[in-house]
Amino acid sequence: MVAIGYLHEAWAEARLDGIDGDCMAQAALFAALSELVNTYGEEATAKFATGLSERIANGEFSLEFS
């Protein structure tokens, strides 16, 4: 939860600087996937990513943030 708090702070600051939410989302996804590849390698990260479509469709990422 602490890590998510840091991300929310950075996101809010970027929005105040006029950075579009879609741009932030794509940059955050790139950074996250790059970190996973650096930590676990391409194959493990690809395996993780294959399950994302179903998780998204099931609403796992449909959260409201204040």
Image (cartoon, helix red, strand yellow):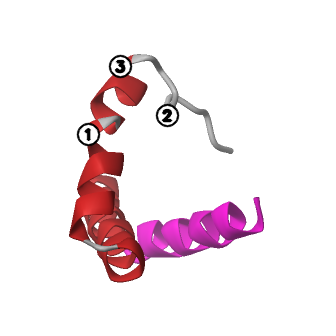
Single out the residue that lies furthest toward the top.
Answer: 58
Q: Is residue 8 left or right of residue 21?
A: right
Q: Which residue is mark 2?
A: 61
Point 34% across, 23% down: residue: 54
Q: Amino acid at mark 2?
A: Phe
Q: Amino acid at mark 1?
A: Thr
* Residue 20 in view (yes/no): no
Q: CA distance from mark 3 to mark 2?
A: 9 Å
Q: Please determine whether, in this image, residue 26 is positioned above or below residue 50.
A: below
Above or below residue 2? Residue 52 is above
| Residue 50 locus on image (x, y percent) | 26, 39
Range of the magenta residues? 1-19
Q: Residues within 10 Å of mark 1 (few under 14, many from 20)?
A: few
The quadrant in which residue 19 appears is bottom left
**Would you name the residue on which mark 3 appears?**
57
| Residue 43 seen from this side | yes
- Where is residue 35? Give x, y as percent: 38, 77
Q: Which residue lies at the image location 58% right of the left edge and 32% below the top edge?
A: 63
Q: Is residue 2 magenta?
A: yes
Left or right: 43 in relation to 60: left
Considering the image in quadrants, where does the N terminus appear? bottom right
Check disc 1 and report its element: helix, strand or loop.
helix
